[in-house]
Image (cartoon, rainbow, N blue to C red):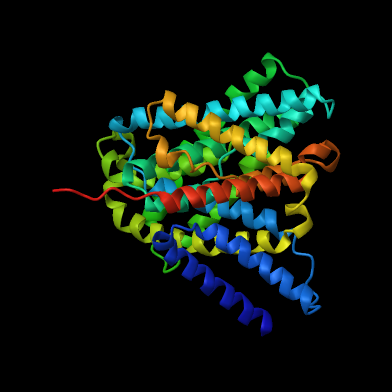
Amino acid sequence: MSVLLTLCTLLLLAYVFDWSAARTRIPSVILLIVLGWLVRQLTNGFNIIIPDLSDILPLLGTVGLILIVLEGSLELEFNRSKTKEVRTAFLAALLPLLVLAAVLAGAWVWLGYGSWQSALANALPICVISSAIAIPTARALPSSLKSFVVYESSLSDIIGVLVFNAVALHAEPGWDRMLTFIVQLAVMALISLVATLGLSYLLQRIDHSIKFVPIILLLILIYGLAKAFHLPALIFILIFGLFLGNSAELKQWRLLKAIHPEKLQPEVQRFHELITEFTFLVRSLFFLLFGYLIETSEITDTRSLGWALGITALLFLLRALTLKWLKQQVFPLLFLAPRGLITILLFLSLAEGDRLPVAGKPLILQIIVLTALVMMLGMMSYRRPEKTG
């Protein structure tokens, strides 16, 4: 009963954090991490024995990532007028990731910490924007900036996972790796198309009182199977969400007449509401647990703090230059480059023997905290323009 009461209290506090975020401009994720850390200090202070919960973190993170990308993509409009925005978001996600990964890997190789491949594999988790933090924080932005953040952070996750898998799973670079990239993308695109049409058909045809939970379970199942074969599974989640969110505009496509996309809207609205609820629950549990598992000594580790400060400064410098080059609104987009859920998942997927001492857990935690603080301060100083007319 005490566990049940504690969980309910923590999740109710998470709801208060989420509700107040638009007013305080303090991202709820930061408050959740601090709350989890405080719970750890209380359990230690009162000598309360808690089982090892570290194995639950990757599971919650994977489900959370699926739900967050799905929720964000359901809210996006995708048509010909959005082509330029998607292309710009793709470049904004790709260029800083590749440059920062190359600079970090080159520095670590030059300093003798490891081979080029191992250095690159350790650098990539740091280079990926966390959609789990960026998308919820973007709610306070105007719709045009919000959609850019959703596209950019989702694409950053997809590109980061794809490149990370290629670097971590293939021993030697070369044209065969490039060919593997192309094959993976083609196979995943085909799977996404077939699975999206099939799930959309089920969403419309199931007349049982329980219809959305099986769809969510099938989404996670297909994602898991794709990941097992090292395919970029997030592409499927993004395509499925975009298809459902824009189904009313697809009625002119002859190939889609069999599923009557224009009739999906009432079901999509209910599905979206359920996904929003589930996303809040899983995201809150993930960051509460993440905060709980943080060791104070890791946050204050001075051996990695210099690297963390330098890397954080470099990533925001690269982001500012990229946004300027792409002619995007630098402020407040500059601050929305947090590291978080996807960084943790990629770091945990590295084998113990492949982790460089310089890129250990203290460095990862410090960069996550620093980027979150920069985002918080940037959003607190941002004032949304008033509507005129």
Image quarter for residue 104? top right
Image quarter for residue 166? top right
Horizontal arrangement in the rendering, residue 204 relative to residue 287 (left or right): left
Horizontal arrangement in the rendering, residue 346 relative to residue 322 (left or right): right
Horizontal arrangement in the rendering, residue 343 relative to residue 362 (left or right): left
Where 106 sits versus 312, above or below?
Answer: above
Which image quadrant: the N terminus?
A: bottom right
Image quarter for residue 11? bottom right
Residue 71 in sight in this render = no
Nearer to the camera, 220 or 127: 127
Outermost residue toward the left in this view = 389
Which residue is at 45% across, 59% downward? 275
Outermost residue toward the bottom in this view = 1
Which residue is at 48% across, 27% downward? 322
Residue 119 in sight in this render = yes
Which residue is at 76% across, 39% downward? 359
